[in-house]
Image: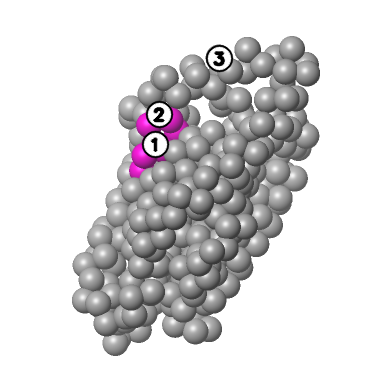
Amino acid sequence: MMLWLPAIIHPPLMPAPEGPVILYSVLYDIFSGTPLLSVILGFILACWETYFFTRLLNKNELIVKNSSLASLIFLILLSIFPDQLTLTPLLPALFFILFVLHHLLIIYSKPEHFDRVFAAGFFTALASLFYLPVLIWFGFIIVSFLLFRSGKWREWIASTIGLLTPYIYLAIYYFWNDEFLLKAHEYSDFFRQLKFGPRCLDPGFWVPEGVILVLTIWGLIKNRRGIMERTVELRAKYSLFIWLLLFSGLTLVYARSLITSNMMLATPAFALIISSAMTGLKKTRLIELVLILLFIGLLINNFIIQPFSVS
């Protein structure tokens, strides 16, 4: 709650929609005029996603049972930059991405569940209606099939149909309102223009981002030995989160002004990798010290380094 306090005192504005993101445009039209309400809704959504993420890890035995470390890191990472402490396109997109992860992880132990495969594609499409670069994540679903050694062509078809279903209805809507060609050009133009966002980012971005990357690299190295001691299923599921990092990075080429918030897509992977490494430490004082320093650094960043734009 402390990390969101500056946003409650000086609510940041919701970022304007970029590209044809019809669902986020609706949210923007409704809540952009009430910044404080946007911050409150964003905080509630972040807390719910933290709860769902923790249940996801516990159900798949990816973390120590009843451990709250992963959820703490997850929520901290969602609150790391001041401009994302509101209802940004990434928060609802991450909401649906967690559902994608939920269905993909079930596929490993329950093959022939084509409804789960369909749902993974369907929720990816819904996420893209808030944040268009998420469409790249369809490749993440394909990778999960290969990773889980599930290469049946019917699963590929089911996931593709799931991805296309919302867009078929959307195309009909645009066609009915004589906007089909206009919107088709908008989608085409969006993906043809590669923009990496602002070229110059202040220390308020690079310092916390650098700390997270260092902790993640350390976590990957430390977990490398422990992962070999796990079952084949747990190794495959853990590897899926590493692939999640890659696809989160790919979306950066279309992040544009949302480059700082884009790292939200990688939050599940960051939280799992870092928490797994910290849980394996024998001296818990080191864990507490790192988290305290990270928390204090974020407070300084949110209160001092990056001032809010008052609505």
- Write down the residue under mark 2: 197
* 1 or 3: mark nearer the eye: 3
- Write down the residue under mark 3: 185
Q: Which residues are magenta?
A: 248-255
Q: Is residue 103 magenta?
A: no
Q: Is residue 295 above or below residue 169?
A: below
Q: Position of residue 111 (x, y in %)?
A: 50, 67
Few, some or many residues within 10 Å of mark 2 (<14, 14–19, 20+): some
Q: Position of residue 212 (x, y in %)?
A: 34, 56
Q: Are marks 1 and 2 in contact (CB under 8 Å)?
A: yes
- On screen, residue 162 versus residue 297, left or right, reads right
Q: Is residue 177 above or below residue 35?
A: above
Res 20 seen here: yes
Q: Which mark is residue 252?
A: 1
**Which three-letter amino acid code belongs to the residue tagged 3?**
His
**Which three-letter amino acid code belongs to the residue tagged 1?**
Leu
Q: Residue at x 62, y 18 (%)?
A: 183
